[in-house]
Image (cartoon, rainbow, N blue to C red):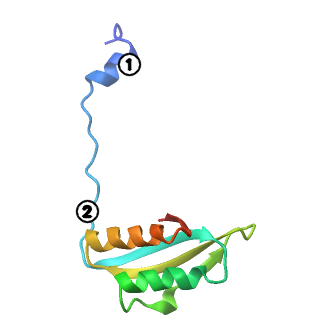
Amino acid sequence: MADKPLRDLRLDTPATSAPAPRVEFPCDYSLKIVGDAADDFHDTVVEVVETHAPGFDRKSVRVVDSRNGKFQSVRLTIIATGKPQLEALFAELKATGRVHMVL
């Protein structure tokens, strides 16, 4: 074993990556949506989310400004019904041109 370089040892070792955890739907799904700070950013995000998760708890929405005030994050929780719903929501948020990141 000592005669093989480390590089070769890694190639000989089988990959043992654990499968990604599966989400069971429906479930509570927390989102953090980040974009440029603006007075109407919150309203834009809530409008898009409402089309994909009607009736989500608007009282749970929190808006947090970045340290320098350039960005805002809108944090909320929806009831996710499946992967297609989440993919459509992410696509529409991105299509607004105002969302930089969805976590």
Neighbour tally class for label 1: few under 14, some 14-19, many 20 plus, Cα within 10 Å: few
Q: Position of 52 compared to 99: left or right?
A: left
Neighbour tally class for label 2: few under 14, some 14-19, many 20 plus, Cα within 10 Å: few
Q: Amino acid at mark 1?
A: Arg
Residue sitting nearer the eye, 33 or 24 = 33
Q: Quadrant of the N terminus?
A: top left
Which SS class for mark 2?
Answer: loop
Q: Is residue 56 above or below residue 102?
A: below
Q: Position of residue 99 (x, y in %)?
A: 53, 68
Q: CA distance from mark 2 to mark 1?
A: 33 Å
Q: Which residue is mark 1?
A: 7
Residue 22 is tagged as: 2
Q: Is residue 68 above or below residue 25?
A: above
Q: Position of residue 19 (x, y in %)?
A: 25, 51
Q: Upstream in the sequence, badge 2 or badge 1? A: 1
Q: Position of 92 compared to 73: left or right?
A: left
Q: Position of residue 69 (x, y in %)?
A: 73, 71
For residue 66, what is the image quadrant?
bottom right
Q: Amino acid at mark 2?
A: Arg
Residue 24 is tagged as: none
Identify the residue shown where x is 39% and y is 18%.
6
Residue sitting nearer the eye, 78 or 98 = 98
Labelled pair 2, 1 in contact (Cβ < 8 Å): no
Residue sitting nearer the eye, 10 or 86 = 86
